[in-house]
Amino acid sequence: MTIKLTCIGKTNAEYLKNGMDVYLKRMKKYINFKFEYINDVKNAKNLSKQELKKKEGLLLAAKMENSDFVILLDENGTEFTSNQFATQIQKLLLNSSKSIHFIIGGAYGFSEDVYKRSNKKIALSQMTFSHQMVRLIFVEQLYRAFSILNNEPYHHN
């Protein structure tokens, strides 16, 4: 089983890269995890929101495999506590295809085609975070989920 995270654009802030590296290294003992960036669309400022989402959607679609269980990180998705998220991960690991593919879209969300292809939408919070910060928060929560599932002391109930 593999868990993938695909994002639009690179992480620029060094402190976010460093934080992500901490959790990515820790997660290696639990799961094969792949983290991938898609370059920003060129001349994005000259495109409408819909055109940009469509172009980003094509780039994202190229990264999705037919066998992927695709989960969008979307502000309108289902919210979970950390324990509930861990339970969701456990269910997906037991019932899913060869990979679970989480996707963080661009600033304006996802194209209709990406929404149609997805299997699920989750929200990290009702608050809004920068797309770069969401990456760190998500990776930490995924690590936390595995620590909960393995009864390790990282998460305190």
Image: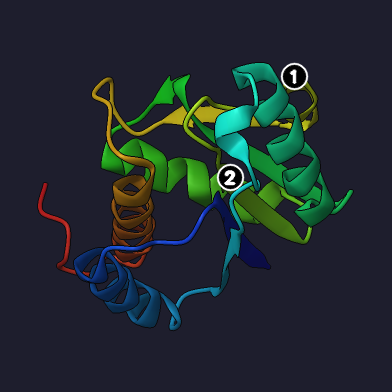
Q: Residues within 10 Å of mark 1 (few under 14, many from 20)?
A: few
Name the kind of residue labelled 2 in the image. Answer: Ile
Image height check: is 143 above or below 25? above
- Between circles 1 and 2, the one closer to the viewer is 1
Work out which residue is located at the far right of the displayed protein and give it. 66
SS of the residue under disc 1: helix
The Cα atoms of the two marked residues, 1 and 2, are separated by 14 Å
Image height check: is 124 above or below 79? below
* Left or right: 108 in relation to 55: left
SS of the residue under disc 2: strand
Front in this rendered view, residue 152 or 113:
113
Q: In the rendered structure, find residue 112 and report the number of the disc placed on it.
A: 1
Front in this rendered view, residue 116 or 78:
116
* Left or right: 157 in relation to 139: left
Residue tagged 2 = 103
Residue at image position (66%, 28%) is 53
Image height check: is 62 above or below 32? above
Q: Quadrant of residue 72?
A: top right
Residue at image position (55%, 32%) is 45
Residue 82 lies, in percent from the top left, at 28, 42
Front in this rendered view, residue 73 or 28:
73
Q: Residues within 10 Å of mark 2 (few under 14, many from 20)?
A: many
* Left or right: 92 in relation to 24: right
* Left or right: 112 in relation to 3: right
Residue 12 lies, in percent from the top left, at 34, 63
Name the kind of residue labelled 1 in the image. Answer: Glu
